[in-house]
Structure formats: structure tokens, C-alpha cells
Amino acid sequence: MNIKSIMVPATINASPESNFKQLLNEMLVNNHSCGLIGYGNKLHGMVVARDIMLMCQQSFNNESRFPSPELTVADVMHSKPFCLHQDTSVYEALVTAKVNQLKNLPVVDDDDNLVGIISQTELLNTYIDLMDLDQALRKTNKKLETLALEDALMKIGSRHAMEIDLKYKQAEAKRNKSSYAIALIDVDFFKNYNDHYGHQLGDKALQSVAKIIKKVKRKSDRVYRYGGEEILMIMNDIELEGATLAAERIRAAIEQAGIEHLGSKLNVLTVSIGLCSQKAGSWKDMVKAADVALYQAKQEGRNRVL
């Protein structure tokens, strides 16, 4: 089942130049949890409850009147909202909503015209209704594995979540004509590490690497376990130069952590990183290009970004 059959029809509520107080009144009268902003059928932004709460907090801190008569929708809304295509399956839509922590998702057609809106709660309820109760007991464990969004060892996104997120990242970049980057991060001489220290300490080393990456990465970037000791990072709205600087910070932080690795020439744990950044690029082609760059980084001596 796709989301077109369960979405709520939606239209643009206001333009960015509209008075925010009027939009707020309309949301209250119609019991809407978000406002859709744009022109005609083209969505340019959204106003959600969190946006309103932040504005209220700023107003309280500054002891100013909220909303001020001059406040426009553009002053409050966040642009480039995450949209779903109307043919997206309920399952993929639910995973997307959970991965990106979105409560409401606008729905668009083939021409990127706004046609509806769907909530994470509606998606979850519909998905539960679709489950066959007679088969639920036999398939529970398999379903839990399929739905797992987090890698149990490294506490970062799973491979399954990564593939879904990459698919929608590509669609978003194509729609907005924006650039994004993919980084493949691989622990150097990891087989030597496991052979010398054992697999239990090898697992702890991977956990340490993941923690460092999560600490050093940009807030908007997302990290997933690609496989084995390889980690994939999606870097939003960034060209190759910026992606290289961000990846270099991660490489340096891991080296500077000083995790002992006597199976490496540097005697500390290091990583090699392969990068690819494109404008509205195909995620599959970009992953292949990042993998080629990673191979080259290892051929040139490891502990580097290419």
C-alpha cells in the first residue's frame, strides 16, 4: 500500500510574505499541527509546533510581544521541508519518518506539486493494521531485524536505514538542485588489530571510533555502519572542499585519540576515508566513487582522506 491512499489532502496555507499571526490563527481554528508555506501548489517551507515554541521562548527571553504585528511567515518557517512522493510505500515512509525524526511529512506528485500530508502516527497505525496477525508470531524476530534502525554494536544507523536515507537524500538533492557528499570510513589494518588483541577488544575499538565520529561530525551529518569495520557518512548541503575539511577533522581526531594498535606502523588506530560530492548525484554511483577513493587512500599509505 502506498501513502496516497491514506494521506490527508493538503493545500498551501500561506506564502512566506504572509502575516504570521494570521497563519497562527488559521492553524488554531482548523486544529492544524503545521502550516504549509509556498505559492500555488509548490511547497517552499513549513511552520511546525517546534518553530512556534522557539519563537515564544525568544519572545519571553526578550520580554517582547508575540507575535508582533510585523512578523511574517518567512521569519518563522524552516525551508526545504522533507517531502515524500505519493507512491511511497507505507513501510518506507514510516522508516523515513523515524530516521529523520519527522512528525509530519508533506506529500508531492510527479511534478513536485503538494497533494497531501501524512503524520508519523498515521503511518505507524496503518502499518500495524496491515500486519497479518496469524503470521505475526512466526515473523516477529525477522520483522524486528528488518525494522532495526540502529546497529547494535556501534550504536549508529544500520545498513537498512542507510539505504533508505540515501534514496531520499538523492531525491531531495535532485528536487532542490543541491550538493551532498558521501564519506566511506575504514579502520586501517583492522584484521591485524583483531588478530593481535582479539575480537572483543576489536568490537570495543569500533565502538570508540563510532563515538569519536559522532562527536566530531557536523550536527546535520548522519552516520551508518556500512559493513564490517566500514562506516558511511551522509554529509548534507556541502561541496567537496567542505567535505574534505570535515572528513579530515574526523581522521585527525581518531588518530589523536591514541588507541593502541601495535599491528599498525603508527602504533595507534587510524582510519582511511574516501569521499565523493556531487550536485543532485545518484547515491549508488557516489558510493562506488567513494569506495574507489577509499581504495586509493589505502594504496597511498592509509591514514588519509581522498
Image (cartoon, rainbow, N blue to C red):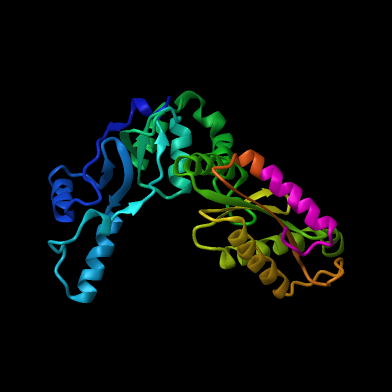
Examine the image and state in which quarter residue 252 appears.
bottom right
Relative image position of residue 116 (x, y in whole percent) = 31, 33
Quadrant of the snapshot with the C terminus: bottom right
- Please tell me which residue is depicted at 32% across the width and 38% down the height of the picture: 42
- The residue lying at 21 percent from left, 42 percent from top is 13
> For this rendering, which residue is in front, 205 or 134?
205
The magenta segment is 287-306
Q: Magenta stretch mostly in which secondary structure?
A: helix
Residue 125 visible, this angle: no
Residue at figure coordinates x 39%, y 38% from the top left: 124
| Residue 104 seen | yes
Is residue 242 highlighted in magenta?
Answer: no
Residue 69 lies left or right of residue 183; in this view the side is left
- Please state which of residues 68 and 176 is positioned toward the viewer in this rendering: 176
Q: Position of residue 143 (x, y in %)?
A: 54, 35
Judge whether 283 appears above or below 218 on screen: above
Q: Residue at x 56, y 29 (%)?
A: 138
